Amino acid sequence: MDAEILAVGTELLMGQIANTNAQYISSRLPDVGVNVYYHTVVGDNPERLRKCLESALQRADVVVMTGGLGPTQDDLTKETVSTVMGKKLVLHEEILMKIKKYFRDVNRPMVESNIKQAYLPEDSIIIENDNGTAPGCIIEKDGKVVIMLPGPPAEMKPMFESTVMPYFEKKSQCKIVSKFLRVFGIGESSVEDMLIDLIDKQTNPTLATYAKDGEVTIRVTAKCDRCEEAEKLVNDMTEEIKKRLGTALYSTENRDLAEETAYLLLEKKKTLALAESCTGGLLAAKLTDIPGISEVFLQGKVTYSNQAKVKELGVKEQTLSEYGAVSRQTAIEMAEGIRKVAGSDIGLSITGIAGPGGGTEKKPVGLVYVAISSSKGTECKELRLKGNRQRIRNITCLHALNMIRVNLISG
């Protein structure tokens, strides 16, 4: 089956919000044998929406729509779909009761316009909404399928997983299994070169590489009559890729570097403390996004000034005077200092010039030093990064996380 995702909302066209729903749905549908070939975004205009839906139904078997199911006058998705599909809107009493209960539970008055949300196309499959007031539905007619889901991702995602995915699983003629491998420290072109023979002769499973924010993701996908067969094909290919990429392949479970590093810290029961300068606590923020990290992350200090480096970490004034704050020597003393202060197994430091100002010919913007101290000793990595301030800080954090990860998995 071929699908088109049709997002409804003027706020999407105006750039006020990002269309993350389309990204999410596109990532999930291939797992149930549905190919996504088109994305369309249209504003809250019934005539333009009608034309978009008619076009989508001509080129796709399935149209998944998000947005426009609210109670206000500009929420016209259901009305437009009903017209195009030749279906009457009928009141569903059980849905109306659920909407009323929702407002009682949140202690808010229900206005008359909310009754509109209990009207759905006749003979449709209802998709209940446990996180809001707008139910969704699935309409089947003449070999075509139209699915309507609300716009808020917190409502759309649970509804998609509970009803839409099982709906297509029952219809799928084959089982599709995908695994996403995450790589750091090797560029996309180098990864492709290392796997080129596998890519050139791929049939089943298939390989695809994607580069984003300094990392590379490899998707391995297999299609078989049985899920067990597809899983074996994917796992065998994954093992071959692991042999070729070595430690640069840091996750076979689609975990990002922060998640993988946190997982290793928790698994090995190793404590960590951070001393950040140019990243300003960004690395600590990435790690503290991970649930349970408090068991191993002891503390983080943002030692931005030279005075803070001396007072909080014990960096020698002579080191700062002779080599400067952005130097290998200072980074090493920062890492060793935070480890001693915190009493942690691992101490990591970051010092650099994130820009846009502050650089010199000898120490340009993008020069960063990351040092790590543990029972295995202390090492420091010099980075020469390009890009704006945000990119330099983000890429620095990836390198820092990877240094922690490699330290944890090394002998």
Image (cartoon, helix red, strand yellow):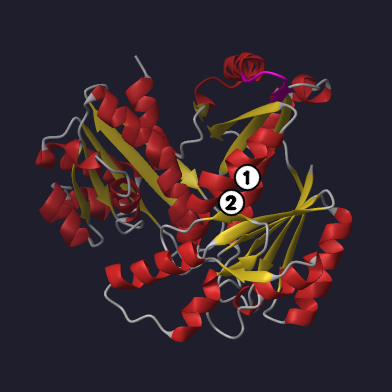
Magenta stretch encompasses residue 225: yes
What is the quadrant of the C terminus in the image? top left
What is the quadrant of the N terminus in the image? top right
**Amino acid found under the numbered disc labelled 1:** Ser
Is the residue 289 above or below the residue 259 in the image? below
Q: Is residue 94 visible?
A: yes
Q: Is residue 188 visible?
A: no
Answer left or right for 206 relative to 210: right
Mark 2 neighbour class, 10 Å CA radius: few under 14, some 14 to 19, many 20 or more: some
Which span is picked out in magenta?
Answer: 222-227
Query: Gap between marks 1 and 2, in whole Å?
Result: 5 Å
Dot 1 corresponds to which residue? 27
Which element is circle 1 on?
A: helix
Answer left or right for 227 relative to 289: right
Q: Residue at x 48, y 78 (%)?
A: 114
Residue furthest out toward the right: 58
* Nearer-the-camera pick, 386 or 251: 251
Location of residue 155 in the rendering, given as x and y in whole percent from the top left corner: 47, 60
Q: Residue at x 83, y 24 (%)?
A: 200
* Nearer-the-camera pick, 88 or 338: 88
Residues tagged 1 and 2 counted as in contact (Cβ below 8 A): yes
* Nearer-the-camera pick, 51 or 326: 51
**Amino acid found under the numbered disc labelled 2:** Tyr
Magenta stretch encompasses residue 386: no
Is the residue 137 above or below the residue 45 in the image? above
Q: Which mark is residue 24?
A: 2
Is the residue 17 above or below the residue 110 in the image? above
